[in-house]
Amino acid sequence: MAKGSGPCVKCWLALALVGVIILVATGVWNPFPDLWQWASQNRALSEPAPAWQQRLGGSPTSVTIAGNTAVVEERTSVEARSLATGVKLWDRKADWAAVAGADRDAVVAVGKLLEKGYQVLDPETGAVRRSDKDAVAVWTYRNALLDVRCVNAKDCTLTAWDPRGSTPAWSAFLPGVHAGLLADNPKLLGTRRLTARRVADDASGPELMPGLLGLPVDGRVVIVDTAAGRVMQDVQPGREDRVVVVGGRMLRIEARARDASCYFTVIARDPATGQEVWRRTSLNLRTADGAGCVQRDDPQGGQNVVVAVGPDGREVVLDAYDGRYLWVGAAGEKLLAVDDRYALARSADGGSVNVHELPVEATRWSRPLAKEGPAALTRYAVVLIDEKPDRIIATEPRGGRELVNIRSDAKVFAVGPGGMIIGDGRDLGYVRFSGSGSDRPGPGAGRPDAGPGDGKAGTTGPTCDGPKNEVCPPRGG
């Protein structure tokens, strides 16, 4: 046969491709989503594979472990799945969802944007335990649920509930409410968490309710005592100041521009008496940007501690209650995560992560980690993200014992007492910790730091009912 007399295979392929592109562009037929689903439906999220893996109807925006369930929030819906099998237990339409309570006492608050009211659901059955028609915002904690309702812009009431309670624990009058206080867990004046790529900011789930809250109201700071249910202070910050509430203290951060630099002073006061308790100068709490010294951000930290940069450039962790230095980093050491118990820092050479138990500055344990590899501190585990190759590693915070070491490029959505939930796109999976034979929380699972203590940062006791006015969870809850 003469050359070129046969069919032009490349021509037919090009013609077919043009035809598919026309069909996709006109909306007649689009095979690519089905092809992608076919190609990825058998791909495990990790190696070894998770205990279970399920495909959702959409990409999750948040996942929270609540007792024996995983509560999954999507863009316009919320659902719960069995932590043991991943099977869907229930779902419902909602624009936002947040978990309050701990372990088997957990509940799910759901609501719709731009609509007043919310419902409190049982995480295992989806049954409605309580309904509200007037609240405009909700805050969820391990030991409480708060909501705020307003008769008008200057007449609002903050109410506290036990997560599974049906009657209010207390109510406090607020002289107005900030326009941004809407939906679930709107921003309060406290600390910013140190975040990590590929680990959800709320991977630990809800925290204990602080003894004092700072609410932004019309440019002022209203400080509420959550133990007594009363407003303690109504403060108007200066134009160059920022006021936050951390560790039972009201911190006034003063920033003054001079010599093309910002000079900071941190003053801590007792909200009950207004008396100054401690003062620190020459500490940069990273609240201002540029030489103008305009403070737009809250300081970084967590629970009762605050992160700052000292005059020598080294990072420090302070106890907000008494101003003590709990940790001072070595030259070049970079803080990655912190709470009342531990500080995680990248070594000066960038090749490892060091874990320090507060307030002891000595390294408790260290582990190699790829440069720029993220690390996060959760209530139940330290999460390390290694790269090239991608791995997810979880270790015990205090001793560094390895709980999980898997090959995966997924995101860590939630960490519980028995394992963690990872996800990629619409796929979600549960990875059990080594030595954990059950997903059912055991006694004290909600309080891994349970034991004798006085509530001060750096002790091994429970961080509640101490001098910082921390509120303890219900006994057995």
Image: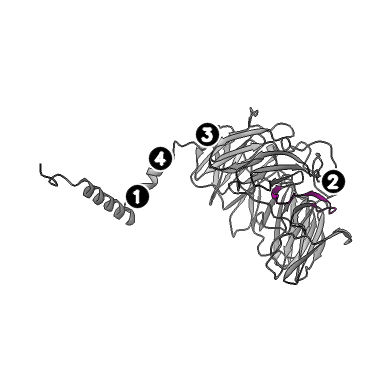
Mark 4 to mark 1 CA distance (whole Å): 15 Å
Q: Is residue 410 left or right of residue 26?
A: right
Label whose residue precedes the other's in the sequence (3 or 2): 3
Amino acid, disc 2 = Gly
Task: Point out the frontmost of discs 1 and 3.
Answer: 3
Mark 1 to mark 3 CA distance (whole Å): 32 Å
Q: Residues within 10 Å of mark 3 (few under 14, many from 20)?
A: few
- Local SS, label 2: loop
Residue 233, by quadrant, is bottom right
Label whose residue precedes the other's in the sequence (4 or 1): 1
Q: Position of residue 158 (x, y in %)?
A: 74, 57
Q: Residue at x 32, y 50 (%)?
A: 29
Q: Position of residue 379 (x, y in %)?
A: 70, 41
State the mark number for residue 8: none
Amino acid, disc 1 = Asn
- Closest to the observer: 176 or 299? 299
